[in-house]
Image: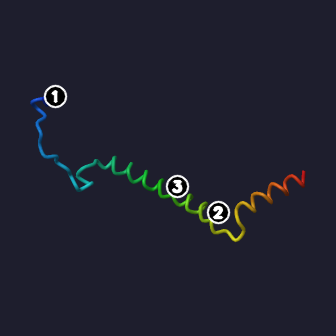
């Protein structure tokens, strides 16, 4: 069973604005820019940690395990 759409909302082609400067206010653009800068920083940190774990000269599990062993021996 289909509902009848309201009279003021007939099926019309959607109007999209492809220029972001026209589609958003300057405050909204500033917020989008701040979010994208923060996301780039987070992504850079994730890349750094991932590269440290994957491409270190010593395997990461060896560093962690020897660190735990040395910590228990010193106590």
What separation in Å lies between label 3 and label 2 (alpha carbons)?
A: 17 Å
Q: Nearer the viewer, mark 3 or mark 1?
A: 1
Q: Quadrant of residue 64?
A: bottom right
Along the horizontal axis of the image, is 60 left or right of 1?
Answer: right
Along the horizontal axis of the image, is 72 left or right of 56?
Answer: right
Farthest front residue in view: 1
The reply to whether discs 2 and 1 touch (Cβ–Cβ < 8 Å) is: no
Residue 29 position within the rendered picture, expressed as x and y whole percent measured from the top left: 34, 51
Q: Quadrant of residue 57?
A: bottom right
Q: Earlier in the sequence, mark 3 or mark 1?
A: 1
Q: Nearer the viewer, mark 3 or mark 2?
A: 2
Q: Nearer the viewer, mark 2 or mark 1?
A: 1
Q: Residue at x 43, y 52 (%)?
A: 34
The reply to whether discs 3 and 2 touch (Cβ–Cβ < 8 Å) is: no
Q: Secondary structure at mark 2?
A: helix
Residue 3 position within the rendered picture, expressed as x and y whole percent measured from the top left: 16, 28
Q: Residues within 10 Å of mark 2 (few under 14, many from 20)?
A: some
Q: Secondary structure at mark 3?
A: helix
Q: Residue at x 22, y 55 (%)?
A: 18
Q: Which residue is mark 1?
A: 3
Q: Quadrant of residue 61?
A: bottom right
What separation in Å lies between label 3 and label 1 (alpha carbons)?
A: 46 Å
What separation in Å lies between label 2 and label 1 (alpha carbons)?
A: 57 Å
The reply to whether discs 3 and 1 touch (Cβ–Cβ < 8 Å) is: no
Q: Which residue is mark 3?
A: 42
Q: Earlier in the sequence, mark 2 or mark 1?
A: 1
Q: Earlier in the sequence, mark 3 or mark 2?
A: 3
Residue 68 position within the rendered picture, expressed as x and y whole percent measured from the top left: 80, 54
Q: Which residue is mark 2?
A: 53
- In this view, the residue in front, 43 or 35, is 43
Q: Residue at x 59, y 61 (%)?
A: 50
């Amino acid at each position: 069973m289909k509902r009848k759409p309201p009279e003021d909302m007939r099926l019309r082609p959607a109007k999209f604005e492809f220029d972001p400067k026209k589609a958003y206010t300057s405050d909204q653009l500033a917020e989008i820019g701040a979010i994208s800068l923060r996301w780039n920083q987070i992504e850079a940190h994730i890349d750094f940690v991932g590269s440290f774990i994957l491409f270190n000269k010593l395997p990461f599990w060896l560093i962690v395990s020897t660190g735990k062993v040395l910590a228990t021996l010193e106590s």
